[in-house]
Image (cartoon, rainbow, N blue to C red):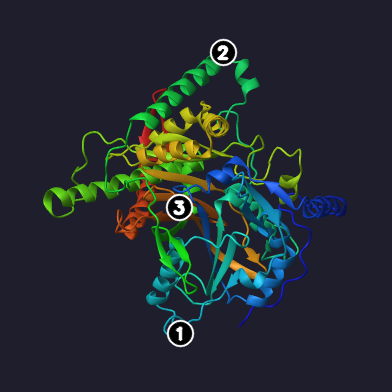
């Protein structure tokens, strides 16, 4: 049965606090001002960077729904929300004389952006074949560039029942429109709580302790030891960053790609040339966020520590099996088949805005906002431990040590600033070449974006999961962690020519969480204190 039309949407906002009439009017006024902005706007350095030859990046999000998607309802919803945003109603044009790119606003024909492919009876059968059909369709979208003559986004609707959802929406957009923080703020502005269709989604905003958040500069000046650590860590990280640009490469493992995006060209039905991208296989696996929080609380670490531990354990298990097959023509998970020294690093994405976390869309669009819309991201080259651990919890402790050190470093901020400086001094192609050099010499791209705590509906369609991914970069493996309700989705985009068995990697990541839970049961046995002859003895029961 098709979904019924949702109630009228309120002004676009994603704040967690209860909104008042005055605040709604303020946000509405901000968005009206944005809608009435200049028809043309110069492209930012990040926009130009994401349109270079070997760094043509896209964001794609697979959204599972509990009911069939009513296409007309979605179109009407988009007309009142998404298309009002400047980036989603603008095309990117290039001046033929100067070569400068500019955003040019225009009227959006939603019909050209909402795509509903024809489905045969076999495609709609709720079997494993339906799962593969959706996966194949989603992956096929990664092989084509978007039409530059219209705004760079589209939504594909597949009313196919899979093992996870009754229908699937695929939101695809060019990375030049904004980063993950910007785009999820915009997406959440189009959603409401399922339990209360008039309420906005709730985003976790629990205050972090001073020891867990990235220390502010003024805070560090009053603590000489921490300030010294910040300086030393930053210098070391930037030297390693420079070495990576010049010669320092990761070990060539079964997870590492070549780092270069090679395009081919085909001819469309009108005889024009169409650029083909090397496709990516998009897969995901959903695990329990409650289990992650259980481990987090028991070990007094952060969710990011646990996620990085899962990543290290899963990749170690996967590579150990791969190397075992190379040596013995069969896998032996219990035997250590890994090389003695494996250098494997992840380019971990950081939000460098002064105001952290997901913010209201209207707040991001204000001129003086600290949570500015756009691509405000830097990255830190983070070493990942690859090896077998007798105690699985060791992966989490090693991850915590790595992350805590990265918090006392300005690497991510300086990588962002350095890219802008290189663009000004040497041009966009030089910045793209250096970025691709870093990608070629590292193994994986990693990001983590927090999602809503409550079940939400997208224009009246309740969502089961959200699996975002990025493609168009040279990494053979990109991994994104996306939380939603009490779930954590691990979403991967892999180069099938390098990683032919991505489902096995998903299994290994999922198994790592189970290993942590089992190890936690052993290490947290109840401790009872017995008083015997005025002495205290510990008894493990």
Taking the image as shown, residue 221 lies to the left or right of residue 527, namely: right
Q: Where is mark 1, residue-wise?
A: 120
What residue is drawn where x is 27% and y is 44%? 253
Q: Where residue 470 sits in the image (x, y, percent)?
A: 48, 53
Task: Identify which residue is drawn at 43% across, 64% down.
Answer: 139
Residue 18 picture location, percent across and down: 78, 52
Q: Mark 2 or mark 1: which comes first in sequence?
A: 1
- The dot on residue 342 is none
Q: How dense is the environment of label 3, judged by Cα within 10 Å: few (below 14), some, or many (20 and up)?
A: many
Is 40 left or right of 114, judged from the image as shown? right
Q: Which mark is residue 472?
A: 3
Q: Residues within 10 Å of mark 2 (few under 14, many from 20)?
A: few
Front: mark 2 or 1:
1
Does residue 297 appear anywhere in the picture? no
For discs 1 and 3, the disc positioned in front in the rendered view: 3
Q: Residue 224 bears which disc, if any?
A: 2
User: Relative to residue 153, is residue 320 depicted above or below?
Assistant: above
Query: Sequence-wise, which precedes: disc 2 or disc 3?
Result: 2
How far is disc 2 from disc 3 in space, using C-alphas?
43 Å
> Most extreme residue toward the front, as rendered?
97
Quarter containing the C terminus: top left
What separation in Å lies between label 2 and label 1 (alpha carbons)? 68 Å
Element carrying mark 3:
loop
């Amino acid at each position: 049965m098709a979904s019924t039309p949702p109630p009228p949407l309120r002004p676009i906002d994603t704040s967690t606090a209860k909104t008042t009439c005055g605040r709604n009017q303020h946000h509405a006024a901000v968005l009206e001002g944005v809608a009435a902005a200049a028809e043309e706007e110069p492209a930012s350095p990040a926009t130009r960077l994401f349109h270079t030859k070997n760094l043509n990046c896209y964001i794609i999000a697979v959204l599972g729904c509990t009911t069939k998607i009513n296409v007309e309802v979605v179109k009407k919803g988009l007309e009142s929300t998404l298309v009002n945003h400047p980036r989603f109603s603008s095309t990117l044009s290039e001046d033929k004389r100067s070569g400068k790119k500019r955003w040019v606003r225009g009227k959006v024909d939603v019909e050209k952006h909402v795509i509903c492919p024809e489905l045969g009876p076999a495609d709609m059968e709720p079997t494993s074949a339906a799962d593969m059909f959706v996966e194949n369709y989603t992956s096929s979208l990664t092989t084509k560039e978007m039409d530059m003559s219209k705004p760079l986004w589209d939504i594909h609707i597949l009313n196919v029942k899979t093992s996870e959802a009754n229908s699937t929406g695929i939101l695809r957009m060019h990375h030049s429109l904004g980063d993950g923080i910007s785009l999820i703020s915009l997406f959440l502005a189009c959603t409401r709580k399922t339990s209360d269709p008039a309420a906005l989604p709730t985003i976790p905003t629990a205050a972090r302790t001073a020891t867990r958040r990235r220390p502010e500069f003024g805070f560090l000046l009053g603590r000489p030891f921490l300030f010294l650590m910040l300086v030393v860590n930053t210098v070391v990280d930037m030297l390693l960053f420079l070495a990576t640009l010049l010669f320092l490469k990761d070990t060539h493992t079964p997870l590492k790609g070549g780092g270069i995006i090679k395009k081919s060209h085909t001819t469309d039905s009108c005889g024009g040339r169409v650029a083909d991208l090397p496709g990516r296989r998009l897969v995901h696996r959903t695990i329990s966020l409650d289990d992650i929080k259980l481990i987090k609380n028991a070990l007094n670490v952060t969710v990011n520590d646990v996620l990085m531990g899962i990543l290290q354990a899963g990749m170690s298990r996967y590579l150990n099996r791969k190397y075992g097959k190379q040596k013995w023509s069969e896998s032996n998970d219990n035997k250590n088949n890994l090389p003695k020294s494996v250098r494997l690093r992840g380019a971990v994405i950081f939000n460098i805005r002064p105001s952290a976390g997901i913010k209201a869309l209207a707040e991001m669009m204000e001129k003086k906002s600290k949570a500015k819309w756009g691509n405000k991201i830097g990255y830190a080259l983070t070493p990942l431990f690859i090896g077998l651990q007798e105690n699985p919890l060791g992966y989490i402790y090693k991850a915590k040590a790595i992350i805590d050190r990265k918090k006392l470093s300005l690497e991510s901020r300086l990588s962002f600033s350095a890219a802008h400086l290189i663009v000004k001094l040497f041009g966009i192609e030089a910045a793209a070449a250096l970025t691709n050099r870093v990608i070629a010499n590292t193994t994986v791209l990693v990001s983590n974006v927090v999602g809503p705590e409550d079940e939400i509906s997208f224009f009246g369609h309740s969502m089961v999961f959200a699996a975002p991914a990025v493609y168009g970069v040279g990494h053979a493996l990109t991994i994104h962690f996306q939380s939603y309700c009490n779930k954590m989705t691990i979403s991967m985009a892999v180069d099938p020519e390098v990683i032919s068995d991505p489902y096995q990697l998903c299994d290994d990541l999922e198994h790592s969480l189970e290993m942590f839970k089992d190890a936690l049961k052993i290490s947290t046995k109840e401790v009872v204190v017995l008083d015997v002859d005025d002495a205290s003895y510990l008894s493990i029961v």
